[in-house]
């Protein structure tokens, strides 16, 4: 499963921070591997192998099975029937009918996030420290749990109750205390154990501790449940039928009903649907088999990014952990005391890479969680008010602070409907009439319906006699609940499976499914008294949820319309990407920015409860509010179950964050009357697209401000080519082509030597290191041949190396040692030429000398897909011409898009491997100006005017590219006019907090710094031209002489 392309908020220090992540979801399951060689070969540590062997010996004595190291680094307890070894929950339905259905979509963090989207995909929560153990045991009663402490031991083997579990722990870890918890993913809740170790915590599914406290209790293994679903699959060539547009067409075809058992055993990508169905029925016939599933997840304190208090069933008993990859794990404790005990112990532990680290807290070692979060929320709100944060990020932060999470569908992040016009052929976002009224809840959008809700409340209030009766309310339903989330996301896995589970194994009737955006808006705003639902975050970043790529047969409505892809408003032109892009632009518009605080008051603020809520028509059933129900004091089990069911199914109101109005956002504009307001530019800076002029984002212009010669890491090079660069306190630091910089520590790796490894050197002097190029450590034998390329992650914690033998290896770097995580094989002979890695989206991209571009999952260290850039490597190989090399691969850290340069072909892909654009067909390169280097910017997809790619060329040119979404092509926006470089560009890096600085290095060792022009540097004539352009929306032309200088003395030229 894949990542979510979720845009990340900015932390208080300017770094990317996702407190809700959230891992949203994205389209696409893990594709069937094209080659057995495209796999991850894991190399466990010797101690880990010894622990596995010890566990295997114990299990053998206990007559349970054997343990082996498979090549996915998962420990499988092989029972009597090997075909019954199941996959990770969440992957069975994503793999059924893989060949008949094609790519199945998935969602993360339910996921965000991907993913975008990503979106998008691997286990719901995965990582290098996560292992899965599947066991099938016979000759035991179904109702009797297996007692690892001795109750069901065989052959009188004496063993500790923890012996089986400790086999899943990393060498050196030992549990100091254990807690019974529940792991929550979506709607699926699994009983688990949380083990507290000195340097990490473990969450191990499928175990429960009884008859004792601490490590003295007995460990029971719990049977994993099975669910059966019935789905209809449509053929790939299916065409949707709409009798209103084409009444001549008959009933659409479908591929037939398929029975799916989850978690299914033996579901493999090459197994036919008939075989799977037969196998599932055979398993159902056997009542003596018990299947256990144990997933062990390790969260090291060094990898912990954040932890948040969360609610579970409206009780304050849960915690949500996020690691440095933004993987979220939601667990619920038995009571609040245990939750607070674990939270206190975590906050007292060293957390070097977390938001609680001492570097942020000014050296303080004592963390008051409530004060820290209050301070952080105030800081986030202040950033938004000052215009330094997007509206999307602000709403995501509010959801996170209010306890909403992608991991709990009953408390999924809630977003507002923004637009009210879904009928026009075109839409003008500058027209305030196209927006919904953000000061009113959905139930008050239509005056006629609002009056009915008002009358209902007054009638209930008149019958309200005492506090034992339910208090009056306006709405019997809610604006957010699990059913509404699945209503929107039913076309994506794993939400399709969850929707089936909610509906008893089959999809709901076609008329009640999500099939038309405009119809859903009318139902929620004016037509339906039972519908006041709001939106979910995916409406603003994830177009895949609007498409039925999995080809599910959702049936036909009573009017004869086939439910397939979601019908979009006319202004979307039938393009889901266009719809999402315009919806996001509307969310970030000036009108919404001025009024968004009013909606926040309703959902998270002072209008959520009390007299203000009543006056605003904003009250719901009392059990949806926090603190209104005390489950611990409800002794009647039937009443308790009824209340829990109502909480789970009818929605939960977010925690109230403010008892006073949220402050409005300061909305600044660059043009005031007929001149530029220079005081407003600072507020506009943060949200200006990369390399665009602040105050005039439709213009792109860069000028060279500094140049220097590279002198670091040059020893032993055949030429003076620059390999990497960065700015350190305003000074340009560059290293040679066989070097790559570790940005946080200002060190660099040197690779390519005969030792088949890397060495770590000092890149710039400091108080600790006063000698540049000083060797700090040497790491030999990292590959079996010389390393051809190396790329560290932006946070410096990961290193990905490519070799001449076509292998890619992933390493963790702790500042002293590199530890191998996996060897990735799939390039089939071509040596590795380029690599990029994104910890934000958990993605690795690698390219080889045969032109192949492969995408890998950093979290699970597995192959995802191959990107096809329009140049077929197979054709190249079969022809007499040499294959085109993959020269560059670069990831956009805001949305996960991937830029590739293969030969002279520049292409842009989304995180799911779909091509978004390639260079304009009219832009043909010859041998003297072909691209030699390419890098992606972090331009969000909704900023259509931004620069998405930069290319360096063999003649020294540097070109900036924009993206035309409608034509699906890259258009050149700007060529840097200052001709500093005259030989091939070998390295580039996009720098600056808002990506307004470009570092360029060439083959001769020359380096330059190019910065975006500021309006203050323009003369009056050019400012007048820009003001006219922004007022009319039409680009004007300036007259230039042959030297590119404005005849009036200016410098601006596109």
Image (cartoon, helix red, strand yellow):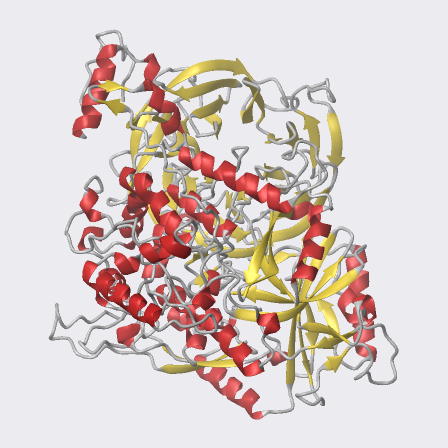
Image side of residue 921 versus residue 13, left or right: left
Q: Position of residue 796 (x, y in %)?
A: 62, 37
For image coordinates 19% across by 62% down, the residue present is 448
For image coordinates 46% across by 39% down, the residue present is 381
Residue 67 can be seen in this image? yes
For image coordinates 52% across by 14% down, the residue present is 708
Q: Is residue 998 above or below residue 378?
A: above
Q: Quadrant of the C terminus?
A: top left
Image side of residue 422 versus residue 8, left or right: left
Q: Position of residue 157 (x, y in %)?
A: 87, 80
Q: Position of residue 540 (x, y in %)?
A: 35, 50
Image side of residue 723 versus residue 1041, left or right: right
Find residue 234 and report its image quarter: bottom left
Q: Is residue 374 above or below residue 180?
A: above
Q: Nearer the viewer, residue 42 or 118?
A: 118
Residue 538 can be seen in this image? no
Q: Nearer the viewer, residue 936 or 738?
A: 936
């Amino acid at each position: 499963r894949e990542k979510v392309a979720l845009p990340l908020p900015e932390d208080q220090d300017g770094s990317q921070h996702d407190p809700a992540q959230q891992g949203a979801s994205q389209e696409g399951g893990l594709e069937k591997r094209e080659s057995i060689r495209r796999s991850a070969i894991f190399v466990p540590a010797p101690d880990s192998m010894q622990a596995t062997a010890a566990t295997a010996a114990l299990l053998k004595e206990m007559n349970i099975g054997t343990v082996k190291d498979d090549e996915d680094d998962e420990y499988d307890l092989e029972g009597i029937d090997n075909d019954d070894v199941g996959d990770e929950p969440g992957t069975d339905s994503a793999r059924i009918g893989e060949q008949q259905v094609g790519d199945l979509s998935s969602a993360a963090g339910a996921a965000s996030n991907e993913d975008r989207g990503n979106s998008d995909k691997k286990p719901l929560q995965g990582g290098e420290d996560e292992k899965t153990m599947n066991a099938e045991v016979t000759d035991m009663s179904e109702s009797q749990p297996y007692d690892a402490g001795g109750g069901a031991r065989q052959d009188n083997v004496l063993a500790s109750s923890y012996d089986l579990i400790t086999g899943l722990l990393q060498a050196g870890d030992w549990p100091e205390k254990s807690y019974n918890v529940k792991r929550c993913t979506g709607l699926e809740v699994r009983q688990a154990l949380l083990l507290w170790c000195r340097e990490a915590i473990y969450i191990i599914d499928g175990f429960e501790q009884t008859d004792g406290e601490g490590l003295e209790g007995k460990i029971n293994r719990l049977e994993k449940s099975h669910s059966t679903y019935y789905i209809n699959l449509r053929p790939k060539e299916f065409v949707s039928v709409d009798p209103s547009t084409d009444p001549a067409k008959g009933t659409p075809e479908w591929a037939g009903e398929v029975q799916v058992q989850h978690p299914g055993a033996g579901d493999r990508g090459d197994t036919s649907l008939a075989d799977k169905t037969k196998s599932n029925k055979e398993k159902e016939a056997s009542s003596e088999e018990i299947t256990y599933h144990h997933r062990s997840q390790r969260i090291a304190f060094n990898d912990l990014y954040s932890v948040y208090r969360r609610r579970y069933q409206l009780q304050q008993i849960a915690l949500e952990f996020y690691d440095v990859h933004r993987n979220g794990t939601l667990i619920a404790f038995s009571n609040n005391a245990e939750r607070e005990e674990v939270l206190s112990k975590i906050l007292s532990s060293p957390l070097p890479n977390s938001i609680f680290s001492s570097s942020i807290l000014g050296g303080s070692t004592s963390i008051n969680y409530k004060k820290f979060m209050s301070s952080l929320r105030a800081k986030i709100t202040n950033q938004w008010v000052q215009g330094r944060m997007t509206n999307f990020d602000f709403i995501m932060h509010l959801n996170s602070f209010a306890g909403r999470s992608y991991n709990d569908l009953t408390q999924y992040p809630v977003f507002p409907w923004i637009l009210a016009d879904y009928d026009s052929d075109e839409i003008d976002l500058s027209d305030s009439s196209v927006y919904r009224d953000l000061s009113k809840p959905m139930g008050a959008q239509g005056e006629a319906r609002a009056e009915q809700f008002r009358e209902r409340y007054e009638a209930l209030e008149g019958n309200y006699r005492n506090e034992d009766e339910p208090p009056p309310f306006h709405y019997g339903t809610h604006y957010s609940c699990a059913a509404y989330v699945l209503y929107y996301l039913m076309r994506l896995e794993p939400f399709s499976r969850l929707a089936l589970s909610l509906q008893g194994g089959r999809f709901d009737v076609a008329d009640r499914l999500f099939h038309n955006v405009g119809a859903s808006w009318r139902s929620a705003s004016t037509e339906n008294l039972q519908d006041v639902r709001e939106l979910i975050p995916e409406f603003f970043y994830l177009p895949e949820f609007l498409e039925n790529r999995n080809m599910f047969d959702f049936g036909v409505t009573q009017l004869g319309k086939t439910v397939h892809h979601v019908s979009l408003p006319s202004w979307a032109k039938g393009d889901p990407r266009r719809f999402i892009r315009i919806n996001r632009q509307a969310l970030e518009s000036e009108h919404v920015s001025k009024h968004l605080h009013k909606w926040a008051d309703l959902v998270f603020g002072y209008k959520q409860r009390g007299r203000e809520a009543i006056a605003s028509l904003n009250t719901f059933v009392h059990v949806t509010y926090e603190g209104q129900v005390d489950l611990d004091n409800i002794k009647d089990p039937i009443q308790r179950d009824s209340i829990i069911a109502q909480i789970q199914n009818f929605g939960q109101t977010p925690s109230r964050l403010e008892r006073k109005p949220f402050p409005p956002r300061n909305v600044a504009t660059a043009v005031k009357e007929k001149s530029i307001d220079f005081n407003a530019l600072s507020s506009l800076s943060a949200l200006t697209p990369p390399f665009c002029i602040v105050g005039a984002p439709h213009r792109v212009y860069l000028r060279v401000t500094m140049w220097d010669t590279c002198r670091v890491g040059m020893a032993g090079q055949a030429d003076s080519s620059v390999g990497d660069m960065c700015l350190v306190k305003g000074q340009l630091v560059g290293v040679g082509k066989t070097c790559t910089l570790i940005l946080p520590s200002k060190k660099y790796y040197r690779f390519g030597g005969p030792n088949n490894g890397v060495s770590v050197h000092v890149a710039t002097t400091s108080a600790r290191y006063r000698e540049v190029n000083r060797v700090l450590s040497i790491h030999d034998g990292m590959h079996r041949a010389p390393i051809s390329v190396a790329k560290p992650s932006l946070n410096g914690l990961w290193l990905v190396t490519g070799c001449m033998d076509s292998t890619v290896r992933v390493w963790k770097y702790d500042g002293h040692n590199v530890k191998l995580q996996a060897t990735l094989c799939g390039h089939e002979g071509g040596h590795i030429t380029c690599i990029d890695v994104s910890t934000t989206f958990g993605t690795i991209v690698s390219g080889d000398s045969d032109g192949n571009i492969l995408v890998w999952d950093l979290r699970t260290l597995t192959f995802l897909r191959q990107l096809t850039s329009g140049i077929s490597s197979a054709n190249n190989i079969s022809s007499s011409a040499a294959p085109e090399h993959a020269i560059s691969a670069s990831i956009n850290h805001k949305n996960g898009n991937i830029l590739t340069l293969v030969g002279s072909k520049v292409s842009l892909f989304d995180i799911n491997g779909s091509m978004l654009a390639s260079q304009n067909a009219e832009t043909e390169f010859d041998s003297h100006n072909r691209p030699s280097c390419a890098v992606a910017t972090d331009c969000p997809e909704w900023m259509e005017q931004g620069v998405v790619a930069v290319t360096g060329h063999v003649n020294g040119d540097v070109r900036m590219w924009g993206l035309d979404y409608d034509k699906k092509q890259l258009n050149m926006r700007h060529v840097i006019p200052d001709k500093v470089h005259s030989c091939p560009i070998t390295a580039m890096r996009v720098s600056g907090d808002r990506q307004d600085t470009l570092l360029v290095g060439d083959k001769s060792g020359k380096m330059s710094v190019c910065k975006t022009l500021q309006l203050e540097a323009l003369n009056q004539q050019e400012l007048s031209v820009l003001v006219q352009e922004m007022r009319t929306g039409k680009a004007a032309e300036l007259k230039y002489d042959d030297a590119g200088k404005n005849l009036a003395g200016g410098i601006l030229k596109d």
